[in-house]
Amino acid sequence: MNKNFLTPDKDPMGAAIADYFSNRKAGKLRVLSSMFDEDEIPVKQLFRGLKEMPVAEQKALHLAEGRILDVGGGSGCHSLALQEMGKAVCAIDISPLSVEVMQKRGVKNAQLQNFFHEQFAGEFDTILMLMNGSGIIGKVEYLPDFFRKLKLLLAPNGCVLMDSSDLRYLFENEDGSFDIDLNADYYGEVDFQMQYGSIKGDSFDWLYTDFQTLSYYAAQAGFKVEMIHEGRHYDYLARISKN
């Protein structure tokens, strides 16, 4: 798990967010991976309003209550939507550029913080981890550490609202069977790297976890997981809470 902050020369997404905020346009935010073909994130999407968000994100924002933590705040779109609903939210990100944009856009409490750092503390009723929020965990082997962190941050009766996707569809055959090598690394562990113009970030691990794997590790740590929304393409929104 990454416990550091980004520097401007290694922060392509932050640079893209800052460009779009300043100029209302941005270049290509390229996404590279050893597992997939090159992709691109439309930077404008990072500035979407509530009505433009996927159903799972809208549901999560409506369900969030009490003291809310928005993990990986980015441009601040989720936090701003929550503020418009009259809700109190603290947005955190490891990108100084993104935090600066959030503050300029009117996010009242935007902080440069790393969720996994030992010094990050607080007590929250709702922790939001959206846009494949499980990604920052990195690898399945880090799920126990993730749940230990939740025990420190969640208030009594608090919950996490997190979305993810089950990548098994990538291994599906025409007859509906799946070719997944159970002896290999977990199939939802992906490496990514981003580039924006001349700014190229370091490669990082990103975790897509299926609902059953998430539920298993949660139970081991004394948590329960409920399916809140199931999308059309193996994506879902889950609520994680203490047993």
Image (cartoon, rainbow, N blue to C red):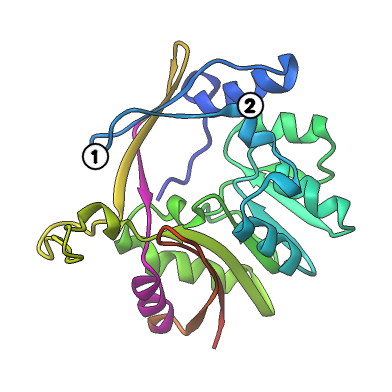
Give the residues drawn in magenta, as a range: 203-219
The part of the image, by quadrant, that contains residue 145 is bottom left
Does the magenta-highlighted stretch encompass residue 215?
Answer: yes
In the picture as drawn, the residue positioned furthest to the bottom comes out as 243
Residue positioned 60% across, 66% down in the render: 161
In the picture as drawn, the residue positioned furthest to the right comes out as 86
Q: Closer to the observer: label 2 or label 1?
A: 1
Residue positioned 51% across, 26% down in the render: 11
Q: Is residue 183 above or below residue 196?
A: below
What amino acid is found at the position of numbered circle 2 in the picture?
A: Ile
Q: Is residue 129 left or right of residue 174?
A: right
Residue 240 x, y percent position in the rendering: 55, 75
Observer-nearest residue: 234 or 165?
A: 234
What amino acid is found at the position of numbered circle 1 in the picture?
A: Met
In whole angstroms, how far apart are the C-alphas of marks 2 and 1?
Answer: 26 Å
* Mark 1 burial class by Cα count in 10 Å: few <14, some 14-19, many 20+: few
Observer-nearest residue: 235 or 21?
A: 235
Observer-nearest residue: 121 or 103?
A: 103
Quadrant showing the C terminus: bottom right
Residue 197 x, y percent position in the rendering: 47, 12
Mark seen at residue 3: none
Answer yes or no: is residue 154 visible.
yes
Q: Is residue 39 left or right of residue 223?
A: left
The part of the image, by quadrant, that contains residue 217 is bottom left
Q: Give the residue pinned by disc 2.
A: 17
Residue positioned 49% across, 82% down in the render: 223
Residue 137 x, y percent position in the rendering: 42, 55
Q: Give the residue pinned by disc 1.
A: 35
